[in-house]
Amino acid sequence: MIPNLNKLVKTYRHINRYREIIYVLARHGFGDFLTNLRLEKYLNIGGKVLKRGKLGKVSNLTRWERMRMVLEELGTTFIKFGQLMSNRPDLLPQPLLVELEKLQDTVPPFSTEKARSCVEDELGESITALFKEFTDKPIACGSIAQVHKVILNNGDNAVLKIQRPGIEKVIEVDLEIMLHLSLLMEKHVNGLEIINPVGIVNEFEKSITGELDFTREAAHIERTRINFKDDETIYIPKVYKEFTTKKILSLEFIDGIKVSNINELLDTGKDPSTVTKRIVDLVLKQIFVNGFFHADPHAGNIFVLDDNVICFLDFGMTGVLLPSQRECLGNIVIGVVKNDPKIIIKALLQLTRGKRISDIEEFEYQISELLDRYSYLSLKEINIGEFINEIISVVMKHKLQIPTNIYLMSKALLSMEGVVRKLEPDFNLIENVKPFAGKMARENLNPYNLSKKFYISLIELSLLLRDLPVQVNELFEQARLGQFSVKFEHKGLESMLQVHDRISNRIAFSIVLASLIMGSSLIVFSGVPPVWHGIPVIGLLGFLGAGAMGFWLLISIMRHGKM
């Protein structure tokens, strides 16, 4: 909890950015949300500022559209957050998910001078010494980085991914503010503790800070290269480590055709059917076999080379699946193919860490009903993305928590499915998943794997038995020394405490008012000079002040609607 408090303190150093975020939200009609967070208590912001946002030109837009516009106006960090949350149908309504999928982070390129300066600062030499040729105009541009083509001194064609100057500081400030807002949401908005806004922001922080470190992306590329070293259907770009740092990524230039350019694929003799099959097999192999996958395989990140070889680009976003999670996913696929809800339910409970649910019969009924609706479709007619979202919806209704990397995996499958449907609309995706799930099921029943799992379980049991007496002894020792303590946190009392504060303030105000009246009366009767028309001026001023204070107290009570 201490790191969160440190960030909370640092938030106040960035008050201008905080105000900018608040004004954008208010201008798009979210002043009620800001008021509910009681931001005026933490920042010097009046209630009028929070409520004054007139919708104007956006008044005819839906709340979800206005949310998207807010994220786009606030820039890189919030756009990236929206893109991440577009994969969370368990948390957000479908209309908002649709809007978040439209988020674009296209920004104008930064100057060539800044790009050159960044390269020279990071690599420690001049551009002319580092490269034979440096193309000033970027070939691609995003909110975090832009890409320049270069020719190395050995003649290789390469590209440099150069981080946008100052973006790291911008993201750091925004993350601190997002954390503070998430803490206020959990504190003041009932029911949000189940969603865990702070946990979501912390998870997002890990994701986006990882994207800022280009050496991690280089490591992802190398790991994928090793995983597919014997596969001739895929090509992984070469990383030039000597020109790669945290802010610079140097890769082999890929001269291929984007998988979305179907006409160009046909004109150059590529076979869409072969390309489709290879893309599906490669993505499924990453998920079910390697457990390390490209999390954003959309059309812009997949190139087709000669002989229908597939090349994946942009490994900034990747995911990892544990062996137990891959096993659960395989069992879900087997349950779908066999139309057996019990297999699916067991796999889902294992995937959600074995959490108990109150009504297992209702859970089984809803899964059975979902399977029945899809049982009338042929395997090639099943939309895997839609099916995944419906399973997640059922799981969410029973308050089961799915690991975050599963949502990342579903995003990868959805992106792949979008590419596949354009290349070959009738492609049977489920039929291609079956062999991977079946192979995994057979491997789990392999005597060697069973004995290995049994051996690991024995080791864990022996460690538990070894440490248990020591842990129990420590517990009793803490109790004996009076160091045993129970921590608890109360929630939902904020409104009651505010009412009590208001009552105590009014009582104190009334006591001061009564004292002022009594003191003024004594002064009037004592005839203390100076006097005006026979009335002491000090006493008269006291009565006028008491009258003003009483009138102010009356207005305050009437404004809150209670006498």
Image (cartoon, rainbow, N blue to C red):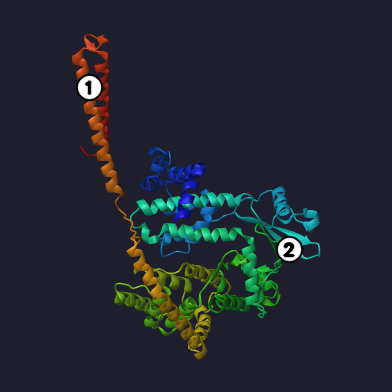
Front one among 200 and 527: 527
**For the C terminus, which image quadrant?**
top left
Mark 1 near mark 2, Cβ–Cβ under 8 Å?
no
In the figure, is residue 377 to the left or right of 366? right
Question: Mark 2 = which residue?
Answer: 242
x and y percentages locating residue 175 in the rendered image: 51, 52
* Residue 248 in which image quadrant: bottom right
* Residue 519 marker: 1
x and y percentages locating residue 359 in the rendered image: 29, 74
Front one among 259 and 514: 514
x and y percentages locating residue 193 in the rendered image: 37, 58
* Residue 459 marker: none
Please report the residue visible at 43 percent of the width from the left and 80 percent of the height from the top: 461
Identify the element where label 1 is drawn. helix
x and y percentages locating residue 65 in the rendered image: 45, 53
Q: Where 326 sits versus 52, above or below?
A: below
Front one among 32 and 415: 32
* Residue 557 in which image quadrant: top left
Q: Amino acid at mark 2?
A: Glu
* Residue 402 in which image quadrant: bottom left
Q: Is residue 558 visible?
A: no
Front one among 517 and 288: 517
Q: Where 327 sits versus 551, above or below?
A: below
Please report the residue visible at 55 percent of the width from the left and 53 percent of the height from the top: 76
Q: Nearer the viewer, mark 1 or mark 2?
A: 1
- Alpha-carbon distance for marks 1 and 2? 84 Å
Which residue ends up furthest to the bottom in the rendered image? 447
Q: Amino acid at mark 1?
A: Gly
